[in-house]
Image (spheres, rainbow, N blue to C red):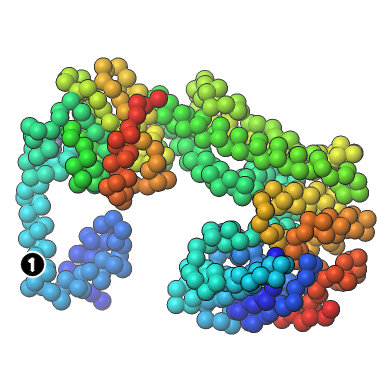
Amino acid sequence: MALSRISLSDFRNHRQTGFDDTQQFNLLVGENGAGKTNVLEALSLFAPGRGLRRAGLAEMAGAAGRGGFAVAASLVPTDGGDAVRLATLVDPRRPGRRAVRINSGDASANSLGEWLALAWLTPAMDGLFMDSAGARRRYLDRLAVALDPAHARHVARYEAALRERNRLLTGERMPDPSWMDGLEKQLAAHGAALGGGRAALIAALRDELAQLPPEPFARPILSYVPGGPAEAEPLQIALREGRARERAAGRTLTGPHRDELDVVMSGKLAPAANCSTGEQKAMLIAITLAHAALAARGRPLVLLLDEVAAHLDPLRRAALFERLVHSGAQAWLTGTELPPFEPIRDRAAIWRVARGEAARID
Amino acid sequence: MASQEIERLAQALARLPGLGPRSARRAVLWLVKRRETSLVQLLDALADVRERLVECTTCGNVDTSDPCAICSDPRRDAKAICVVEDVADLWALDRAKLFTGTYHVLGGKLSALDGVRPEDLNIARLLARVEAGGVDEVVLAMNATLEGQTTAHYLAERLEEFPVRITQLAHGLPVGGELDYLDEGTLAQALRARRPVG
Ligand SMILES: [Zn+2]
């Protein structure tokens, strides 16, 4: 199964752009600002959520249009069966509301996930290993939610309880002990579930990544460093016993809001943050592909890889392409020039993108 | 420029939950056009509410008598008290006659961010009711929100010292769901399957 017969209408700088006769590899080549990433963003809307830029709907509506946009595509089975027509749009008369149609019938955004799995990697994630621990926790939670939607509830509850507890800790009066008990009970329950979800995700990713050869593609070794006791009861005890110290500090010092994701490159065993830009990129790609394989669970997989080839040396690039071929996923790749894609040219559909238009060149 | 009278009414209405200045102004214009009909009805209804409604000093319910009709109903089981956040929750539970005991309205939920502390809620009177004796069971029917559940834990702890069974609504209430919006079947199920607070 793969996406084909794609059309973008009034989507960012694309007034009317179409992609037919797609292949396993689909290359979008053009200058920066030409509208390549916009195409990937449009495709990312075939998953529930806000797409790969996490942008608002109004931002995605083209300036030349009337405040709405439409993106449609056919999910074509390889066995020659009937295609499924997917569309997502914003009606200019109802801005702020994203409608989804599947085979012409109204559907929820969540029901898109019954048909296909999407995964993406953009340059915005390049700094992940150098970024704050909080950015890595948010990244982990996004990945965990894709595997288990219930994870989102534990994240939200934990953060809400944490805000409440921190507010009580910094209040003028001594925090009411029974009130603290009530909050800590919930911090412990949701915190244990939250940490458990992250630990399970990292364990699953480790298993998936362990199947890869360490060379030539940089293989990351992930480990989970918990910020507090993993089980609910010890966490609750630690919170209760930490009250005096934490009132002095003005915040909660133990729990999964202090978790860290540790990433080390196998072989040279260096922390990811100390590795070269190309090595970091390779490790991010490896995590993205491993997670995509876990999350797809039998659904057709579509990968959106923005500007990934340019940062890799030829050896790693060849390894990436080989891995993509074996994944069976449909891949959409962008780049400013064609030569890096030479190894897959003969099995790719290629478009040159300029000023919001796409012309098929191969 | 609207007249002072219209502005004053619009400002008063704008503070109603879920209304806001724009809707309030629209409501005022609608009422002004119907000064002899709908506006008169509204005035009468408001006057009735102001003159006749009181807060029950036992349970915090709003009714025309104090104690309220529920607290003074001899068929009600005074040995069981169902604690709710707001009067709207009481109405939702009582609409279906699911609970045969009496109620206690807290008038909100604990929230550090919103500055709602234990002493801001109708908790002292609940403890006094339980302490007075004759109560076997306290059902904590808080909303499934974080603050609702924190309030339930808080009350459970404060009630620990009394010889009463403390239960809470079974889970299965929607996330962040407010009792008021639940259908009766779901409420009945949550109430039937209530369990001891752990
Ligand atoms: Zn009463």
Seen in the picture, residue A97 relative to B105 is either above or below; the reply is below
Q: Nearer the viewer, residue A130 or A55?
A: A55
Q: Position of B19 compared to A330: left or right?
A: left
Task: Please state if A355 lies on the left or on the right of A280 as rendered.
Answer: left
Identify the image quadrant of residue B47: bottom left
**Image x and y of residue A98, in percent:** 51, 68
Q: In which quarter of the image is the C terminus of chain A?
A: bottom right
Does B130 sit left or right of B51 as displayed?
Answer: right
Residue behind mark 1: B40
- Residue depicted at x 55% and y 35%: A193
> Can you say whether B142 is above or below A110 in the image?
above
The image position of residue B73, as x and y in percent, is 8, 35
Q: In which quarter of the image is ligand 1?
A: top left
Describe the element under mark 1 as helix, strand or loop.
helix
Q: Does the residue labelled 1 lie within 8 Å of ligand 1?
A: no
Dividing the picture into quarters, in which one does residue B81 lie?
A: top left
Q: Which residue is drawn at 91% across and 49% down?
A: A216
Q: Is residue A291 visible?
A: yes
* Residue A311, percent from left and from top: 85, 58
The residue nearer to you, when weighing A104 against A193, is A104
